[in-house]
Amino acid sequence: MSSGLFGIEHSNRTVTDHWGKNCFNSSYPTATACYMLEHNIPAVYIKLAHVNGKLGIVADEIPISQVFNSGAKSSNELFFSFESVFEPYQRYSFDAIDGIDLVIKDLDGRFLSPIEVKLTVLPDNSTCEKEENEWGSEIVIRSATTSYCALGMFDAVKDHSRHVREIFEDACSSIQMWDNDFEVSHKMHELYNSINSFQSEYYQNQKPLLMQTIWKTQGKSPLLADQAFDIIVWSDYAFSRLFIDGSNDGASKMSRPMRATARLARCLWELSRSGIIRVNDIYRQMAFGNQTDKEFSVNGLKWKRYVISDRTTTPILPSTVVNEIIENGYIQRLSPERRFDQTLYFTIQR
């Protein structure tokens, strides 16, 4: 039976699953990516590069086939495994690693790519009053995403473990208690510099990690803009700058960006020493009094500083594309929740 969504023929979700509240937010972006794959429409690619002699974020384009690591395969030759473990990374952890939003496989079961999936509105509340070319989108990041970021970074440079260890050794080996807020926060400058050195050396090994589908509205209205949909893909290195860049501000108390940066440095250092770690133990131990499931969030103002692309002003897909991505008769399967604040706001505005 058809899933009702473009390109998703083989999946671990049932038809009913795809249209549930918590699943549609990753199924629809995946179908949008399949549509772009079949029509040879590249995504925006946010990646790390050397800009004027130093690390910087640039916007490029990337084919969806590279995001999926699927070669010349079409979407009907792929298996979409949602909320699943990317098993090739399990070799790097003694304990069971968490699942990620989407794992791409071929029909023979070979693992191709792990992808975190976001579906976010443009503009968010922090940018909706600004000029349209300054609009941004909020993203909330789970700890599982940053752990996959660390595992993926190491996987790409595992043959250079000795050099990676040399980069992190001085900063990390002197930390006696990684769960001590005072000790780790006072080592942040060294950890920050070590990660910068690592990324300067190995940024050409970056690969797609997070696939953010944006849906653009007419300001704060719920109505879609004429050009409404696009996909922003973040490389693992570019994604990490969302927290690394906020970790070296001299704060004496552990913030969420500082925590994420310290976790990344520790994972890379310990992996470079032994090739295998207890990743979940590291994340639980280094909670520093914050939630362990939520890593950090980025509002539209900060997001826009990283995503400099005309396609945030004019997304590449029109609003009418939903009629091609969603098969006729399936949209009625959605059951959106009613919120009092939303109802009240738009009732009063009439």
Image: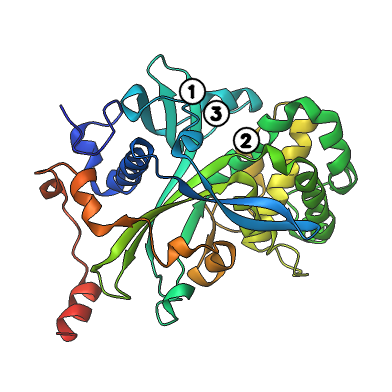
Which residue was labeled with disc 1?
A: 111
Which residue was labeled with disc 2?
A: 152
Q: Work out whether residue 327 can be spotted.
A: yes
Instruction: Report the Cα–Cα distance between label 2 and label 1.
Output: 14 Å
Instruction: Report the Cα–Cα distance between label 1 and label 3.
Output: 17 Å
Q: Report the residue at 51% width, 53% height from top.
A: 141
Which residue was labeled with disc 3?
A: 96
Q: Report the residue at 70% width, 51% height from top.
A: 49
Q: Earlier in the sequence, mark 2 or mark 3?
A: 3
SS type, badge 1: strand
Query: At which x and y percent is residue 91?
Result: 62, 22
Q: Report the residue at 65% width, 27% height from top.
A: 92
Placement of the N terminus among the 4 image quadrants = top left
Quadrant in the picture for residue 127: bottom left
Identity, as a three-letter code, of the amino acid under mark 2: Gly
Does 4 sit above or below residue 92? below
Q: Is residue 315 left or right of residue 336?
A: right
